[in-house]
Image (cartoon, rainbow, N blue to C red):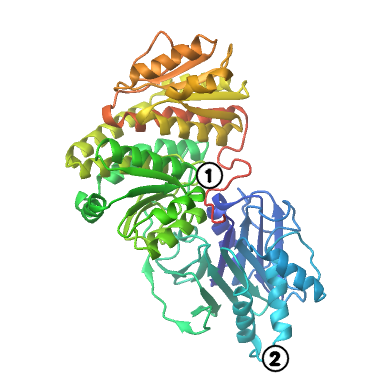
Amino acid sequence: MCGIFGYIGSKNASEVILEGLKRLEYRGYDSWGIAVASGGIKVNKNIGAIGDLDYLPDLPRSSIGIGHTRWATHGGVTAQNAHPHYSTDKSFILAQNGIVENYVQLKKELLEKGYNFETETDTEVIVRLIEEKLKASRNLPAGRQGLKEAVRKSFLKLKGRNTIIILTKDGQIIAARNGSPLVIGKSPDGVYLSSDTLSFAPYAKKMIVVENGQLVDCKDLKVSVFDIKTGKEVDIKEEKIDIENNLIDKEGYPHFMLKEIHESPYVINQILNQDQNTYRDLVYAIKKAKNVYTIGSGTAGVAAAQIAFYLRSFAKIKASALIGADSFEYLDLFEKDDVIIAPSQSGETADVLEVLELLKEKGVKIASYVNMSGSTMSRISDFKFMAHAGPEICVVSTKVFTSQIAWGYLISKIISGKGEQGSKNLENLSSQMDKYLNTGSNHETIKKLAKELVKYAHIFLLGKAQNFNIIKEGMVKIIEGSYKHAHAIPSGDLKHYAITLMEKGIPVIVCVSEDEVKWDVLNAVNEVRSRGAKVTGISSKNNDKFDNYLEVPECGETQAIMNIIPLQLLAYYMAVELEHNVDKPRNIAKSVTVK
């Protein structure tokens, strides 16, 4: 879940890497480090986010360097544990994105051989392992080729999803990939290596996606790629970078989160701008499939569940939703030509990719809806779709979730033969959502509620049918933004267990739509209110059972998509009220590339 970045070119490397790491901070912001080659290797490492840092006074001008922004997995958040890590003789320095699953055994072997360790990280094991390969093998070629071969042999001993990048004191960059992403950007000013294309999109026009099991060797702007198992050089394929609106700027908003919520109508319009014929092959595959699944983790897992709901409700497809890390009991049940749909912001979520890679071998058809160009998920998919939502910088996902469920709604309508109606409904939704977001009184009402809710340790949410996954996502947003305990409850299940938690003053948020389950949900409202709960209703119509009312426009079939907006805003204003780091909540990262 960390971010790595490298640069060779005519610009000052530390300045280029600094800007690249700022664009990668959504991947982790516990600590950061930048190293450049200039009469040896000079490094600057610090705890905390790289944030608004404008320059690096301790680093000399150089044409080559690497950087890293960390989400800690092994070892505490300290400057000592921050990447990159020196070799013993300081001839090279290394940064990693991933987890060495067998690091305990490797470290034990290296300790027995007399190697010392200065950090608590699994990354340092890779450094010492490379040193051992350099020391132990008499058959390695001299110089840079010898280091490349030592890196290749060391990398083969690592278990888990890992990507590493190495800088040598004589100006060589070596990188290797297995699982965690790695892309190369090419521009007239130089070569970029990074965990994602967004970090160098403003500068590079072409990219090379490094595949699993490949090693990159860069020297004097020459890029060579090798197969890690065989050591043989492989052909390089350059692709056009396909990222729209790659500007990273708050554009007057106090936080990226608020800006990105306001961009939700835009992302829905991006879906509407796509020709529905592009879905023809996917629609055909879904219709003929014996089984259809959706899969995701975190917010994307909630989106996957809502997409499955739409497929069942409108397309009458028997769709099942899976959570990435908890879907292994299904693996033996998949059959050839089944279809699995994976929404994702990054397209690099490790626990989802692990499932998809296994299913691809079984002949299962994979469809993905991703917001990051060149992602692994897109590249292994049979049906690949881009969200075109623009950069989502806030770690708390908002507009991409809205895009994912709106896309799932449209697919279900196309399958049912009512694609045109679906488009019209989304067009109306986008218009209504835009008006809602740009009405100041809506924000003031939610701000007032946020000031009240931050006083409580527990918040409950109720919903049913189209709104059940919406309250689950509201729960996720409130937890991420406020660090409060929130609990989403199916309104029909309330009386079976959670009603024991209802007492005087307990806050309950409920989504009520003008649909066939409206009165069922209102019955649940009566049940909690009679026990003293204080109810906030999100609905297009007020009700005398609501103590607080968040009015939303009536949007028919797309009402659930509209209902997520006040929940996202509520989480935002709670985070602001509590003076939390809104765009970078504690302990989480946006792209979870480790299991």
- The C terminus sits in image quarter: bottom right
Residue at (32%, 28%) from the top-left corner? Answer: 559
Q: Pick whichever, 364 or 368, lies toward us.
A: 364
Whether residue 11 is visible, yes or no, is no
Return the residue at label 2: 138
Q: Residue 109: x percent and y percent?
A: 76, 72
Q: Residue 85: x percent and y percent?
A: 71, 66
- Amino acid type assigned to the residue bearing label 1 in the image: Val
Q: Pick whichever, 551 or 521, lies toward us.
A: 521
Q: Secondary structure at mark 1?
A: loop
Q: CA distance from mark 1 to mark 2?
A: 48 Å
Q: Secondary structure at mark 2?
A: loop
Q: Residue 307: x percent and y percent?
A: 35, 41
Indicate which label's residue lies in the foreground, 1 or 2.
2
Which residue ends up furthest to the front in the rendered image?
332
Whether residue 79 is visible, yes or no, is yes
- Return the disc, 1 or 2, that comes first in the chain's sequence: 2
In the rendered structure, the answer to whether residue 415 lies left or right of residue 506 reads left
Above or below, 584 relative to 167: above
Residue at (44%, 49%) from the top-left corner? Answer: 345
Return the residue at label 1: 395
Residue at (52%, 83%) from the top-left corner? Answer: 230
